[in-house]
Image (tube, grey):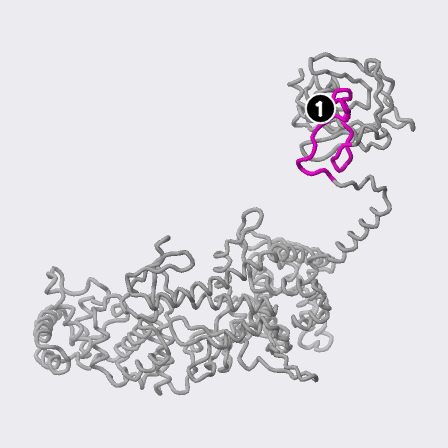
């Protein structure tokens, strides 16, 4: 950049120019003159041909806030700050962008705008005020324009795009990207500058579409012959695929295939791979660099196999070009056969995620709506509340607080008295509204997130039916499948779209025309009346995909959605698409109609979305159960007892004559008059009937380890206190007073000659059902058909 125009002025000339151009009151003029004499005397002690060189020799730009003469008292330090403002405004020195953003004295930019290019700055400020920017956003944009004027030393209306981008690069290098530079670009264009340039300066700095050669050279293939082959192959393929697919193809073939081969096998100069090289590459491909398993492993195999098969096919039609590269593929058909299993596993994961999230969709949507209403109410109430006063909204107390250096009543901030957090209400309301709008439109249409962000006002059409009824339609622009489709608008969706349109409309009643950047295709679209255009610190811009994801994640955190295991749940835009497909088809909509609504080319894709709840299987199974119950005796399906019903374990009227309690599988007792053959099962009364002890001496007494094949738990032998030994027929009965009676019964045989079996249950309580005939216990005959023995008795308590 050229040196400042006033860098060669003498001290006397600088003092005279400052007195003539700076609109200071007498007291301020005197103090500024003293400060100039002090600062210029200090700068004159450094070498240099002009004041700019002396400024740089003093290393003021690198010192930041600690620049200038050291050891000054506060008053002399304030004089030094006042003096440097005069040097910058009079273009005697030109500080760096870093100094202007970190060590700027108060009122430097304001004074500069009042002295230099006053008419231009006034015109720019009027444009910013007309577009509804807050005081903070407006002043930050004006300061960015003043900084640009200082650094370029060029009138703002004559500034070029190269100069603008140079200052922006310095700006971003210090504190990252700022919306103030985007607002400054649009303001300059509105005032007649930067003619012929795109409407958004980001189109000049964001990378556009790269050529095939540039994409391949980013990965750096060492062998020139292989590099030329892959470039030629991708050039042929690029004619039939979009840019995003081309980038994915380059990533697989160049980065994940051939450069990996060259890294681990430096001597490989041909695509004809040996079995060892191919096997080693496939093994590395299984996992990502961080050790996680690669989910798209088979996609890589299919892509590489397709590369070899294409070369073989093209060698037949153009042998002079491709025949030298034709060779067997290192991936056999058997190796890609496992992709079906991976596909099924991925389908199962998606189905499980849909089943998990579907019950929470109502709460998710309700939370977004509640947040939108509460923030709108709080913003309206805070705008009518003075700073320092408190207000209560939805049971929460807030206090209006001042907002930064540039206060603005239209953009209030409040402090939550419960948490102490300061909320910028205008931004919070903006986020809450668009969170609700995104969730509602996705939930009611099932469209893709890219299709949502591309919606325009012209996409809403009216269809006049033959009967005279008007049906609103939503025309969805082509996206993934390049197929346009039309979605009927329900009354609920129509209400949501109407609210969005009312919010986005400008003062003239129309939606602003803005351009949208497609991150996948890396192109800027034409200016259109987009529906999802947000205003956050600047003119409207179309919401990005990352921004939409972030808004939905914030709503999920606000709703505190958690799975049964406590893991937080989150919603993605595609989750809402899958839930929409599932609910519409399971509600009775023909699947081919759902295919049209979702924009799928293949019906199998739609079936993959909706095959989550097997409604037909459940319905038919219930019909089978009802039919089977109608053919079984009604005694098997008696109504269960209430929870607080009778709990007596005896079936005798006297309560002491019987020791066995007959129960049905439903849990209610059988009457004493019920014949034994009709009793489903019997339960021993612990208080009246002797405890049955059965164990095997060699296992219990010797090794203290029960025999697992009898169903007893290996690690907890004390749980198997009572069982029936079908092997040796040895039984003992222990009463409550530790007395025992031997059962000298014959071998345990059923009439059919089969051995008794121990029916093992699950859980902590195990019941063994034993078929028996006639037990002789101290001359008492007890007819038992099925005896239920509770094996959870405490053996130590009976010993």
Residue 170, visible in the rendered structure: no
In the rendered structure, does residue 661 fall within the stretch colored magenta?
A: yes
Query: Quarter of the image containing the C terminus?
Result: top right
Looking at the rendering, the stretch of residues picked out in magenta corresponds to 640-669
- Among the 4 quarters of the image, the one containing residue 161: bottom left
Instruction: Report the residue at 9% width, 81% height from top.
Output: 16
- Among the 4 quarters of the image, the one containing residue 740: top right
Q: Secondary structure at mark 1?
A: loop
Furthest-front residue in view?
A: 653
| Residue in front for this viewpoint, 701 or 562 | 562
Image location (x, y in percent) of residue 65:
22, 63
Image location (x, y in percent) of residue 768:
76, 29
What secondary structure is the stretch in magenta mostly built from? Answer: loop
Whether residue 490 sits left or right of residue 661 in the image: it is left
Which residue is tagged 1? Answer: 706
| Residue in front for this viewpoint, 308 or 183 | 183
Image location (x, y in percent) of residue 623:
80, 53
Q: Relative to 370, is 8 above or below?
A: below
In the rendered structure, does residue 393 fall within the stretch colored magenta?
A: no
Instruction: Report the residue at 72% width, 60% height from top.
Output: 332
How many numbered marks does the figure carry? Answer: 1
Residue 297, visible in the rendered structure: yes
Query: Quarter of the image containing the N terminus?
Result: bottom left
């Amino acid at each position: 950049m050229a040196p400042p125009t006033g860098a060669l002025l003498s001290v006397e000339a600088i003092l005279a120019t400052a007195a003539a151009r700076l609109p200071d009151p007498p007291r301020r003029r005197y103090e500024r003159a003293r400060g100039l004499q002090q600062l210029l005397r200090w700068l004159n002690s450094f070498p240099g041909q002009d004041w700019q060189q002396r400024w740089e020799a003093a290393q003021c730009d690198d010192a930041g806030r600690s620049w200038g003469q050291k050891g000054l008292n506060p008053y002399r330090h304030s004089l030094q700050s006042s003096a440097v403002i005069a040097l910058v405004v009079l273009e005697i020195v030109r500080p760096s962008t870093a100094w202007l953003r970190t060590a700027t004295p108060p009122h430097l930019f304001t004074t500069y705008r009042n002295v230099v290019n006053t008419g231009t700055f006034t015109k720019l400020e009027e444009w910013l005020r007309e577009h509804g920017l807050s005081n903070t956003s407006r002043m930050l944009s004006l300061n960015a324009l003043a900084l640009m004027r200082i650094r370029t030393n060029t009138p703002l209306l004559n500034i070029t795009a190269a100069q603008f981008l140079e200052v922006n690069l310095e700006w971003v290098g210090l504190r990252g990207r700022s919306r103030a530079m985007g607002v400054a670009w649009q303001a300059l264009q509105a005032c007649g500058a930067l003619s012929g340039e795109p409407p958004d300066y980001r189109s000049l700095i964001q990378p556009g579409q790269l050529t095939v050669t540039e994409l391949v050279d980013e990965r750096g293939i060492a062998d020139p012959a292989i590099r030329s082959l892959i470039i030629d192959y991708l050039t042929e393929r690029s004619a039939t695929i979009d840019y995003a697919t081309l980038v994915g193809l380059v990533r697989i073939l160049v980065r994940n295939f051939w450069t990996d081969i060259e890294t681990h096998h430096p001597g490989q100069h041909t695509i004809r791979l040996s079995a060892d090289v191919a096997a080693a590459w496939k093994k590395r491909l299984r996992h990502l660099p961080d050790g996680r398993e690669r989910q798209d492993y088979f996609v890589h195999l299919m892509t590489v196999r397709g590369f070899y098969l294409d070369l073989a096919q093209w060698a037949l039609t153009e042998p002079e070009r491709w025949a030298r590269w034709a060779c067997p593929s290192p991936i056999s058909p058997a190796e890609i056969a496992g992709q079906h299993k991976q596909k099924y596993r991925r389908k199962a994961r998606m189905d499980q995620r849909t089943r998990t999230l579907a019950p929470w969709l109502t709460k998710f949507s309700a939370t977004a709506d509640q947040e939108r209403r509460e923030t709108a109410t709080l913003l309206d109430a805070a705008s009518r509340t003075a700073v320092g006063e408190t207000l209560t909204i939805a049971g929460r107390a807030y206090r209006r607080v001042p907002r930064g250096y540039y206060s603005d009543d239209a953009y209030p901030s409040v402090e939550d008295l419960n948490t102490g957090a300061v909320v910028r209400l205008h931004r919070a309301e903006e986020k809450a509204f668009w969170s609700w709008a995104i969730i509602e439109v996705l939930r009611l249409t099932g469209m893709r997130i890219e299709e949502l962000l591309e919606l325009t006002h012209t996409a809403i059409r009216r269809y006049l039916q033959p009967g005279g009824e008007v049906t609103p339609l939503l025309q969805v622009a082509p996206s993934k499948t390049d197929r346009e489709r039309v979605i009927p608008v329900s009354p609920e969706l129509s209400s949501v779209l109407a609210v969005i349109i009312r919010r986005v409309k400008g003062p003239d009643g129309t939606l602003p025309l803005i351009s949208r950047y497609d991150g996948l295709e890396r192109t800027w679209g034409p200016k259109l009346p987009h529906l999802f255009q947000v205003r956050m610190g600047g003119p409207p811009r179309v919401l990005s995909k990352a921004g939409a994801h972030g808004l939905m994640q914030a709503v999920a955190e606000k709703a505190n959605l958690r799975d049964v295991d406590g893991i937080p749940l989150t919603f993605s835009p595609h989750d809402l698409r899958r839930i929409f497909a599932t609910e519409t088809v399971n509600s009775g909509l023909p699947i081919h109609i759902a295919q049209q609504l979702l924009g799928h080319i293949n019906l199998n894709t739609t079936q993959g979305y909706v095959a989550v709840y097997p409604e037909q299987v459940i319905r038919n199974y219930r019909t089978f159960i009802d039919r089977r119950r109608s053919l079984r005796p009604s005694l098997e399906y008696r109504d269960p007892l209430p929870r607080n019903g009778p709990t007596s374990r005896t079936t005798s009227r006297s309560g002491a004559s019987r020791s066995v309690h007959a129960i049905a599988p439903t849990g209610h007792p059988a009457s004493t008059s019920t014949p034994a053959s009709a009793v489903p099962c019997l339960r021993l009364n612990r208080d009246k009937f002797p405890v049955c002890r059965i164990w095997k001496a060699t296992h219990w007494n010797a090794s203290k380890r029960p025999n697992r094949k009898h169903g007893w738990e290996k690690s907890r032998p004390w749980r198997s206190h009572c069982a029936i030994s079908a092997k040796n027929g040895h039984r003992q009965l222990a009463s409550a007073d530790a007395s025992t009676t031997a059962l000298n019964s014959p071998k345990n045989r059923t009439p059919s000659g089969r051995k008794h079996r121990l029916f093992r249950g699950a859980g902590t309580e195990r019941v063994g059902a034993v078929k028996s005939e006639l037990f002789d216990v101290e001359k008492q005959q007890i007819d038992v058909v099925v005896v239920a023995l509770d094996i959870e008795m405490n053996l130590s308590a009976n010993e």
